[in-house]
Image (cartoon, rainbow, N blue to C red):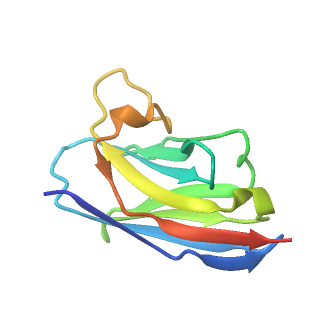
Amino acid sequence: QVDLVESGGGSVQSGGSLTLSCAVSGYTYSTYCMGWFRQAPGKEREGVAAVDDDGNSNYADSVKGRFTISQDNAKNTLYLQMNSLKPEDTAMYYCAARPLWTYEYCVPGPQADFGYWGQGTQVTVSS
């Protein structure tokens, strides 16, 4: 059984920073694409960032230059460093994982391709 548990959410003021963590257990595939997604109230869930087992990362245009996805394989943990936060970054943030097959790129979408999801952690940015 694959479990993903997010933590690190909270409330910050505009311009502030937060680091989200996602602890992964039970994942046995030799390759992976892991991503962060978010869902704001009344909006569809959207992809934010993704990283593969080679360390290649991709970001949504809305967060490029502000967010950084990283991983610590020794700790089986995925991170999302979020800087220069804006009120529009307010959302529930989810981490997700899927195997990465040959010739595939690891991008934060489509969501249906990600079979493993955490429960989410709330991020609220006030102006």
Horizontal and vertical percent position of residue 74: 30, 68
- Residue 120's place in the image compared with 27, above or below, is below
Q: Nearer the viewer, residue 73 or 43?
A: 43
Give me the residue at 66% from left, 64% from top.
Answer: 82
Q: Which residue lies furthest to the front in this view?
A: 42
Q: Which of 38 and 28 is in front in this view?
A: 38
Q: Residue furthest right?
A: 127
Which quarter of the rendering shows the N terminus?
bottom left
Residue 114 is at least partly visible in this image: yes
- Residue 22's place in the image compared with 12, above or below, is above
Residue 86 is at least partly visible in this image: no
Horizontal and vertical percent position of residue 39: 57, 52
On screen, residue 44 versus residue 120, left or right, reads right
Give me the residue at 61% from left, 78% from top.
Answer: 10
Quarter residue 18 falls in: bottom right
On screen, residue 53 versus residue 127, left or right, reads left
On screen, residue 36 versus residue 27, left or right, reads right
Horizontal and vertical percent position of residue 26: 16, 60
Which quarter of the rendering shows the C terminus?
bottom right
Give me the residue at 65% from left, 40% from top.
Answer: 60
Give me the residue at 57% from left, 42% from top.
Answer: 44
Q: Residue furthest top?
A: 103
On screen, residue 1 versus residue 51, left or right, reads left
